[in-house]
Image (cartoon, rainbow, N blue to C red):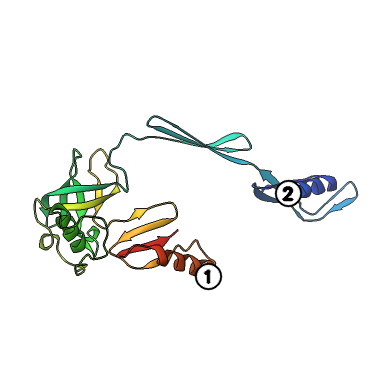
Amino acid sequence: NTPAWGTEQDSVSKKKKKSESTYFNKTPRWFNSSLMFGKHYYREPFYEVMKKELIISHEGEQTTIALLEDGRLFELHSEEAKSDFVVGDLFLGKVKKLAPTLNAAFVSIGHDKDAFLHYQDLGPDFLSYKKFTKDTFAKKQQSGSLKNFEVQPEINKNGMIDKIIAKDDVVLLQITKEPISTKGPRISTQISLTGRFLVLIPFDDKVSTSKKIENSEEKRRLKTLVESIKPEGFGVIIR
């Protein structure tokens, strides 16, 4: 860092400013030892206080995000929501073509280009999703509850896709990567419903916590709370 120089009074005022500030980032800088005007300046830290502001504007399909530092524009991001195929969206798709050499399938979900589904993106619970979808169409499954649902065996993680699904099969899927000009969306049949504080995972009974929650007592409290209210047949990740 470039050394900053000042008087002893400057150092005191900056320390005072540091103690009074809240909600600011602090960038440490240093005095170097030196002899100026007969007074010895010792090496000690002082702080510059920086105010940050995040401004979000949403008009129609255009979203703009600006980051200001001390009132000056530091970053600007703009995005236009043209796509109807956003990461996290759920679709029912029909298998159009199998590609055994890629161990993948191409699935029609309404985009100009078919979505790409690799075997590894089927997820271990694919057969349960397949049965749930089939039972729903046949009106055997009348709700989203998994309380009395017969969970199917997990698929072999090193299997082949043409042994699991066939052309014209209807599959429940989720967008994992948005389409680009030359390729259709990337999809998965392993569904996760993400919220601000929780992630809900069908056909999974585990309750786990994010690594961002470091306090062990708080982790136990949250897990106990979620386990008492979560629906049967669903797993939860606490964020």
| Residue 52 percent coordinates (x, y) | 60, 41
Q: Is residue 102 visible?
A: no
| Residue at 54%, 70% in the rendered image | 217
| Residue at 23%, 64% in the rendered image | 125
Nearest to the eye among marks 2 and 1: give it: 1
Q: Are marks 2 and 1 in contact (CB under 8 Å)?
A: no
Give the residue number, with chain letter if any, for mark 1.
Answer: 216
* Residue type at numbered disc 1: Ser
Compare residues 237 and 83 and report the one nearer the observer: 237
| Residue at 60%, 34% in the rendered image | 72
| Residue 139 percent coordinates (x, y) | 15, 54
Give the residue number, with chain letter if any, for mark 2.
Answer: 18
Q: Quadrant of the C terminus?
A: bottom left
Tell whether 39 sits left or right of 189: right
Under circle 2, the secondary element is helix
Please identify the quarter of the rendering in which residue 78 is found. top left
Under circle 1, the secondary element is helix
Find the distance from the CA under tag 2 to the CA under tag 1. Answer: 32 Å
| Residue 86 percent coordinates (x, y) | 31, 43
Q: Quick one: label 2 or label 1, which is nearer the N terminus? A: 2
* Residue type at numbered disc 2: Lys
| Residue 133 percent coordinates (x, y) | 18, 55
Compare residues 51 and 27 and report the one nearer the observer: 51
Q: Is residue 38 above or below residue 218?
A: above
